[in-house]
Image (cartoon, rainbow, N blue to C red):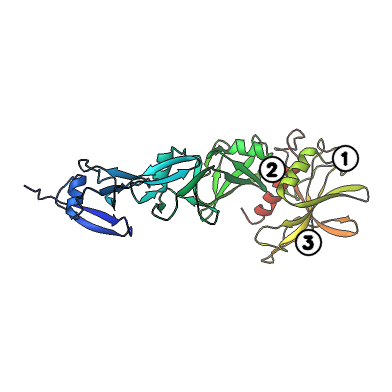
Amino acid sequence: MKSTHKSTVRIASDETLTFQDFEIPFVNPNGAQILEAVNALKDDALLLQCLPSGALESIRPDETPDLRTSFEFILSFGDRTYNFYINDAQLAWGARHVSGETLRKLSKTTENFDVFQVRNDGEPHLIRPDTVIDLNHPGVEKFITRQKIWKLRIQAITLEYEIQHVKVGDAMKRAGFDPTKAWDIYLLIAGQPKQQVDIDYVIDLATPGIERIRLMQRNVDNGEASALTLRHEFSLLAADVTHLDATGWKWETIKSEENRWLIIHNYSMLHGYQPATVKLALLISKDYPQAQIDMFYFDPFVTRSDGRDIPSTQIRAIIEGVQFQGWSRHRNASQPWDPLTDNVATHLALVESSLLKEFGE
């Protein structure tokens, strides 16, 4: 006697993968009862349950699938197997279609690798877990795996990782920033408000839309505060060269009068300023890094796009006959320059922090 209770499942033909709803006269139907309800109880019928992970699981006639997990199925016919390669290993699958997640399970591909399909054009195409591949296409399907590479930008430095999770403090060290300093740290994700984090925060690099880590020093005062008396001569460290080269900027070191300058060409200004690109000049003393880098200078002069005045930008410097606009921004007494950890990279972070602070960020 059939049960008066019913279940609804969605079944797609293996040929078209178009899902249709079917009513099954059982609360917990087994594979044979589902096949019978759709007039497909045949020896060559294969019922595949579509799991939330993207995997396709074969359901035996006497097996009861968990409809709470998924009520979607693919119906396939035939007694043939479909052969394919993942890297150099030959595998077989008993249905015409296979999902990316099922490929991962069949090949025992770990989570830190991506699966790619190699097509006739020779260009590998990424296979996502929910991608469904038709194995009936002519020829043997070929797949390869590659180590996943995640990218994270810290200020202007792009880091690459083969691991999915990374601690903010560790990433800062790798990019050349001292995490023990007083930083305001923000995680920027596209389409979301900036998120303030600390050095112990663990970033999941697989999160869609991650753009970068923004560092803002807490030790920036406007020029109204008393400036430290500094010497203005030049010396460039090997670590500075490494950092500047990593940013991709075009830069040079020049002598002008009694001073030595680091000039960064085509420095991109943040939104809200004009012009969009400028020369950025840093004056570094002969005793650097014992003596700190102080202030920064722009050519041409920088203004706000909304026309509002920018305070403490009245200082001028003449570099090879060109007048630069000096921004009087200094570290304060609570966070003085540390010659063991501060350098060009940390001062460039101060530059960006000062530009952001002008707009209250």
Residue 347 horizontal/vertical position (percent): 74, 44
- Position of 180 with respect to 131 (left or right) is right
Which label sits on residue 286? Answer: 1
Work out whether residue 89 or residue 113 is closer to the camera in this orientation and state it.
89
Marks 1 and 2: in contact by CB < 8 Å?
Answer: no
Tell me the crowding category of disc 3: few under 14, some 14 to 19, or many 20 or more residues within 10 angstroms, Cα based: some
Q: Who's the residue at 69% across and 46% down the image?
A: 349
- Position of 220 with respect to 214 (left or right) is right
Residue type marked 1: Lys
Residue 214 visible in the current orientation? no
Q: Which residue is mark 3?
A: 301
- Position of 303 with respect to 83 (left or right) is right
| Callout 3 secondary element | loop
Residue type marked 2: Asn
Front of the two marks 2 and 1: 1
Residue 87 horizontal/vertical position (percent): 50, 42
| Callout 2 secondary element | loop
